[in-house]
Image: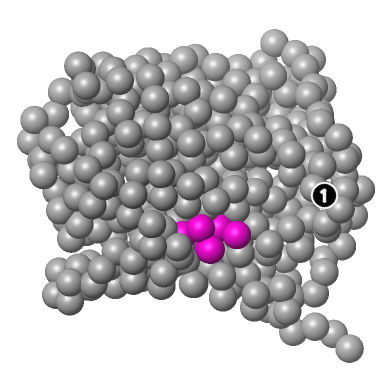
Amino acid sequence: MHSPKWQNPETLLMVTAAAWGAGFATWLALLNNFAVDVISFTGVEIGILQSLREVPGLLAFTVIFVLLLVAEQRLLMISLLVFGIGVAITGVFPSEIGFYLTTILMSVGFHYHETLRQSLTLQLVSKERTPLVMGRQISAQAFASLVVYGLIFLGTKYANVEFATMYALGGSVSIFAALVCWKAFPKFDVHVVQTKKIVLRKRYWLYYFLTFMSGARRQIFMVFAGFMMVEKFGFDIPTITSLYLLNHAINIFLAPKIGKLIAHWGERKALIFEYVGLIFVFTGYAIVENANIAASLYVIDHLFFAFAIGIKSYFQKIADPKDMAATASVSFTINHIAAVVIPVLFGILWLTSPASVFFAGAAMSALSLLASFNIPLAPKPGNETVKGPRFPEEEALIQQSN
């Protein structure tokens, strides 16, 4: 008996992406106002919170050891469940220590889920379809987030819904989805047996570097861009939520198109475009004095997130198929090395010079731009970087581009 058409890996990954999006949208939309208005956080405490949030990301490599005991697809559901519980109980503990502890719980599920979803996507989806499928996952996240932000906007502006209620409802979406997916989807076979140990290969060095820099830059956006909106420009929950609504409404339609664009352009051109744009965005953050311009930069910044698909699809093209799960876990750890340090150090820097935080983001984008020029036009195993050995078709592509 054949399974229904919807019971396929791409649907499973999109549903879990949407459920993750709903839970994280709740946590993120309420973060700065909950921290400032309820717990009286300053830049120092918000930096500590975000560094604690990234510790489970630094330990993401442990996924590979858990996979010795639990099947990868099942662990994906468990991680989504843990994430949902962490979000749901956040509002129950409105204190500094309570916020720290619930954030760590939420973050364990968050980072395991992201690691496993990336790994399963690279294993279960063809190289040709990966950018499109990842774009659709972002679109599913955006749609779920859009619904959540809309409800939070209405609930805070017209109904005065309490923080604890909103956190509980948002987390419950992720919990429910995890339980439903556990029952509704069959176990999908992965054709290549995955390496069950830590994998670090010299030929993946450019992927590691781009991943590291991506994590560092992302922290500046996640921690300080939103915090600037609240602290410097006085944005309230409805206003912040309106920005999130706009961001995700745009991403619903643009993310799949960006995925197609990456497949058409190739990773090299797509990432160069992203990093040039980010240099201007971070510089804008540093000097902006107008709230409307700051909000516009925030929306533009968010749009560039989808281009990070290019880093993952580049790795899929150069990697040994059996390295997908192990390298996904290692890459999340690499992504979070700087993420654990930056929020605390930059939180202290923020007290004296907020602009310096964003100028640092522009510098990181410039370094990534220089590195992206080393991506071949046709990356493959043995042809991981421009300076490495090339396949005949790579030489032909280079000659055509000249």
In the displayed structure, does residue 94 sit left or right of residue 233?
right
Left or right, 29 with reference to 311: left
Q: Left or right: where does residue 146 sit relative to residue 155?
A: right
Q: Is residue 214 visible?
A: no
**Residue drawn 65% across and 49% down?**
112
Is residue 224 depicted above or below 138 in this figure? above
Which amino acid type corresponds to the residue marked 1 in the rendered image? Leu
* The C terminus - image quarter: top right
In the picture, which quadrant includes the N terminus?
bottom right
Which residue is painted at 50% across and 28% down in the image?
340
Q: Which residues are magenta?
A: 82-87
- Residue at 25% across, 22% down: 350
Q: Which quarter of the figure has residue 223?
A: top left
- Residue 315 x/y as whole percent: 69, 34
Q: Secondary structure at mark 1?
A: loop
Circle 1 sits on which residue? 67
